[in-house]
Structure formats: C-alpha cells, structure tokens
Amino acid sequence: MEAPGEAGTVPGPPRGASLPPPAMPTAALRLLCGVVVPAAMLCAEPLPRVAFPSGDPRRILTRFSQENVSHYDIFLLGEGEEELYVGARDRVLALAVGAPGTIHAKASITWGPTAEKTSECAFKKKSQETECFNFIRVLVALNQTHLYVCGTYAFSPACTYIHLENFTLVSSGKSQPFLDGKGQCPFDPQHTYTALLVDGELYAGTMNNFQGNEPIISRSLGSRTLLKTDAFLRWLSADAAFVASFSIPNDDKVYFFFEETADEFDFFERLLVPRVARVCKSDVGGDKVLQKKWTTFLKAQLVCSQPGRFPFNVIHHAFALPRRDGSGGADFYAVFTSQWQAGRAGSAAVCVYSQEALEEVFEGKYKELNKESSRWTVYSGPNISPRPGSCSMGPSSDKALTFMKDHFLMDGKVAPTQGRPLLVKTDVKYTRIAVDETRGVLGAVYRVMFLATVEGFLHKAVELPAGPHIVESIQLFGTPEPVKNLLLAPGKGILYIGYSGGILQVPLANCSQHRSCAECVLARDPYCAWNIARSSCQPTRAASGDNGWLQDIEEGSPAAVCHRGRSLAMPHTHGVHEGPPVERLSPSLNAVVRLACPRHSALATYSWQQPGGWGGSALLPNHTLVVIVRRGTAGTYTCLATENGYTWPVARYHLQDPLGATPQDGPAQEGLSWDTPVAPGGPRSYWPQFVTVTVLLAVTLAAAGALALAAYCEQLKAKSKVQGCSVPHSPPGRHREKAPLNGGAPAGEEERGGSPACCLQLDGDNGPGDSTGTARLPVTA
C-alpha cells in the first residue's frame, strides 16, 4: 500500500473545498517582468517632436553627388571649415563648402587598383563588381601641405600622400608607387576600422591579414619604432571590430573603442562585449621583453544596460566631446544595440562615459587566466612597481613587462554616467553619433546629439536634466539606406552626412518653421530663440545676449517666457505675434468642407472650437474637421494645440453663411456631435427623424416582400416537376415480397389504402412516345 503523497495516486482536496490559486512559475514570472517593464519604459521614451519626411520643403538639405562615384565614407574638414575632403570608392574629392547651402567640387583624384591587382583579387574569389576596388579608409592631414590616404586597393592595402597645392598623388618610388598599407587599413571593405593622427603618428585599429581574423592596434609613421599588439598573446579576440579612436587634448593616452567576443565569460553561446582600450603616447616598446609591442596596452569592458531589458552589448560608434568648462577631460558618447534583439527592429541606447570613470577602472585590479581551470580570475598577487600598463613604465622594466603579457584585461567595468543609458529608443538602430555643444541666450551650455539610423533617419536630441528631448527627426532618403558618416562643422553650423550615393549638408538650426513665439519656445531647440525686434524665430548664433531674445530650453514654457504669465486673452508683451491668420471660405449650401489642422508637434493634443448653431461635423483621424454647410454653420472654426500645459491656435477658418445672413458667433463649443444643435429652451422638431425612419421602414418591408415572393415562386417550380405514376411491375419469375423487411405495410396494401406511388422525373418530360430512356425513381408521396 502506497503512502499518501508518494508516487502513485495523488490525494485531492476534500469534497467542497476550494482549490488554492496555482503559483506562477518562475519562468513565467520572469517573462511577465520582461514584458511589463519594457512596456512601461516604452511609454516614457522620448518621441521626436517634429518629423520631416524626405523632400519636405520645411527642412532644406543640400545634396552632392558625382556620376560613377559611390561610397562617400571618409570625411576630413580643412582648417577654417572652407574645404571638405572626401574618400570614396576609387576616388578622393576636394569640395568647397565655404558658403552654407552650397557644395562645389574643386578637384578630384582617381585612385583605383591596377588591372593586375584586380585580377589577383578575382583570383582570391572576391567579386569584381562589389569588392575588387580601392575603398578609401584612412584620410588624415599630415601637415599643411600633404594628406595621408590609405585604401583597400583590391584586398592589397596601400597608402600614399596627396599634395594639396595641385591635389595630386605623390609617388613613393618607381618600383613601388604606393606604400604598404598593411596594419593601417583593412583588406576587406566590410571590416570596421579606425585611424587617428596624433603628433604626426598614425594610430590605427584594423584587421592585419586577408582572412580577417587578426585584429591589430598599431602606431606607424613618424620617426619612432612601429608598435602593435601581440597576436600570439591574444590581447584581442579574432573577431574584434573597431568603431572609434580618440586623443584628448592635454592627455598622454589614446583610447580605442571596439567590440569582441568575451573570453572571460563561460557561456553556451558567443557573447559580444563592448570594450575600451588604452595605450600611452610615450610608449616605445620594450628593450628585451615586448620588443616592438605595446607595453601600456590595457582593455576594459563597457557596461550599458537598463533594468528589464537585455544588455546593450553591441557598440556601433562612439564620439568624444572634450569639456570646455576648464575642468579638462572629456565625455565619451557611444551608441549600442543588443545582441538579443526583441521587436521589429530591436532597441538602441546611448550611453555616456566620463574619462574619469575610464581611468578609475584602468587604475584598478587586473584579471588573469588560471591555466589549471582555464578561467579568468582576479589577480591577488603583490603590487608591482612601476604599475604595469601605466605611462610611467620604461622599456627596461622587465618584471612589469612580463606581467603585462598576461594581465592586459581589467577586472572592473566602466559604468555609464548616472549608472544608466542617457537615451533608449525602441524600433530603431543607431549607427553613428555626433555631439555638439552650444550656448543658449542666457549663457547656459547645452549638448545636442545627432543620431543617424540604419534606415536613413537623423534624430536631433538635446540633453536636459529631466532627460533627453528629441527636437526633430529627418528622413534623409526616399528609400531606406544606412548613414556611413557624420561630421560636424560647428563654426558654420553645418552637419555633413555621408552615404553610399553622396553627401548631405544639414543646417544645425531650423528656426524658420516656428511661426510664433510659443512654437519657438516649445521646440526647446538650443540653436533657436525668439527675436523680439524681428518678431521671428532666429538662430542663436546671431544673438549677442539675452536682451531681445526669448528662450526656455529646460522648461519650454511659453506662458512664462512669451507672455510673462499673461493668458492668451490678454495683450501680448514685447510685440509678440501669436496665432495664424484667419482663412475665409465661402462654400455653397450642402457643400462638404474639410478644415485641416496642421500637426505642428507630435507631443501636442489637438481639439476644435466651433460656433454654435445648426450643422453637422465629423473629426477624421488626422484631426481634419469635416463640416456639412447648412443653415447656422457659419462662423469661426479654430484648431487648438495643447502642449506642456500651454494652448495656442494653429489654424483658423471663417465660413461665410451660404444664405447671405450675418453669422452670429456665439460661445464656442468644444467637441463634436452628429446631433443637430438647437437654441437653449427652443422647441425641437422631430420631423426629419420621422421621415427618415418611415423611409427606412418602407424600404425594409419592400425588401422582405420581394424575398418572400421569390421563395414562393421557387416552391411552385419544384412542385411542377413532380408527376403521379403507377408502381412498376415485377419482372417475370420473381415473386412480390409479401411483407417488407423493414416491418412496414405490404406493397399491395400501400397501393390500395395508402397514398399512390409516384415517380420523380429527373430529365425532361417523357411521354408515351419518348424513347430517351430517362430514369424514373419511385417516390412515396
């Protein structure tokens, strides 16, 4: 006999007892948290206040392209921001961009691979249509007279110099016209890369071989020894992908941002980790240990995560913004996505890291690989002097250099500012970022982020204490296409965008679209402010102080700025013009009039004010008001927008009375109704409703009668095909069955006392002379 509760029959609750609610499984609880928490965060995500579709005349973009030129990937802005050098496929361009809104080609260099190199590329199983070209990947200003340029050169990286005076290539020799670009430029144009010129020396992060499995951080050019990472010691994973590199003014280090597969984590699948690496500018390599290798190379993990979401562990680009407040240092902005995307297009995040946070991790504890367990653990041994990886290390510090071979990974992780992402956006994938600092009319400094997406959109977002505010979203192309490069020209107030088909010049400020002080203030665009003297929204680059300029970036309150606390009904101060002009319409009687309500802001709610009187109206999903012109519909119709607690008119229409009577604009009524309004206290006539119901009832009865008549006719047709007939005789020699097997009456009795047998004619009308042989089936009537 089995004990209760053990294997076998499980005892149930007593009869009549209620079952307790089942406990939620842990997996289901985690799933619920993973769904509910992101949904709540989604509601709090910032939305672009204004969205401009491609070709919108309200957002003017200057485009440049040349025939048979593609992949405008690399930008270099000349001193004074008068010239823009562009590296494309098989081409280097010099463009004149001195005047905003204009881009002119000054000179062009065609630098493609030779026929021999193209043939070798095709022999290596590479495509002659898409890969065997010279994609420019490095373009830096070597000095006042020369540029240094490198390209993939049909999977044989090459470098050369460009003479700026006549904009021509400088040959390095007759036997070898170009320099070897291995270690400075990738072989494959699809591989990521980064390059930076510091004090005449080129710091590069790229792939060092044709197979694309040997990443390298190198320093070349100049008079010092060439340095690079050690591939044998696996300082970098084989799939490392570099996205950016920076040198901060008054700092002796160079930083590289990249991603790679993490070796320190033991997971069942490949885990990507964003990294930041650091080398010292004073590094000269070791005398005996780590000869011609970096002796100060250290790397650490970047963290960009948010509760309730997958971690953002795939880095796409980074931007360094040096501080101008005199404190020194810089802040690093980086855009991420997640390796485990959820949703249609996943999510993107922007995280900010201070230089102090990076240095704190690099001055912390090291990780080391335990060779017995093959696991990474924290180094707990004695301290070594000088500190390994510091810029004070000398080339003869053999003990510290030997330690550096296996202790290049830091134990600490670099956390973002405030411990969370600055911006998280769903259903978008940011590919590039650029950050600008601008000063408001009151002297405050604001940071504006320009974020490019993989589908060809540009988001402009201002960083505020309460969270980022996305000022606008611009669709750059008619068809989805990724943005390849962003370059700021803050002196000209221009952003240059590179893509496969050309270059775009985007003004940072777009103030002319704001027609009133309220809209100018609500935009919260640091580049724009309301000019009282001109009664228009103007770029702040022309502002010399707060006198005569109105702006409120933190709060965006027109009531506090434009009206100084006054309401719309009171006179405006400073001569500020508010509200659109009234558009007068004279429709005919019973005409259908559509009154559009311009959607100036996606953050606003819209409503209509319509005059009292007779008439019907309807509101479409796009806030367009449809009015059927009848007696009493004349008057003024106003579309109101409410944003940030402030209400202002965005459209006004005045409908003339079709009968010529003077309209009486009574108190405005908000909201819409299909019922016909009547004067308060007046008699109401139900004659229109009575006529409508009567007509509908008559139509319904007529339709029902027609259906009944049609059914009766069908029954008559069916009966006309049924004819009476006698029971067929049995064949000779066969006796008739006396009693049927089913227990019914005999056939004779049925013929004598029952209903006569009939036959149903299936085809035609067979008379006595018909010999068609049509079948007749016996049917009991």
Image (spheres, rainbow, N blue to C red):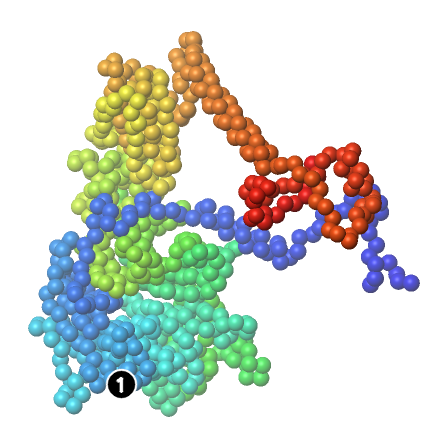
For disc 1, the marked residue is 120
| Residue 199 placement: quadrant | bottom left
Residue at (47% x, 56% y) in the render: 343
Check the picture and name the quadrant holding the N terminus.
bottom right
Left or right: 733 with respect to 122?
Answer: right
Left or right: 288 with respect to 780?
Answer: left
Task: Give the answer, above or below, for where 553 lies relative to 356.
Answer: above
In this rendered view, identify the residue nearer to me: 295 or 208.
208
Q: Residues within 10 Å of mark 1 (few under 14, many from 20)?
A: some
Residue 238 seen by the camera = yes
| Residue 66 placement: quadrant | bottom left
In this rendered view, identify the residue nearer to me: 687 or 192.
687
Task: Give the answer, above or below, for where 608 lies relative to 90.
Answer: above
Q: At label 1, which amino acid type do we have?
A: Glu
Q: Position of residue 706 (x, y in %)?
A: 50, 27
Task: Give the answer, above or below, for where 216 lies relative to 291.
Answer: above
Q: Position of residue 508 (x, y in %)?
A: 24, 51
Q: Position of residue 348 (x, y in %)?
A: 41, 57
Check the picture and name the quadrant holding the C terminus.
top right
Secondary structure beneath disc 1?
helix
In this rendered view, identify the residue nearer to me: 709 or 607.
709
Left or right: 774 with respect to 667?
Answer: right
Residue 424 seen by the camera = no
Residue at (79% x, 40% y) in the render: 748
Q: How many marks?
A: 1
| Residue 390 placement: quadrant | bottom left
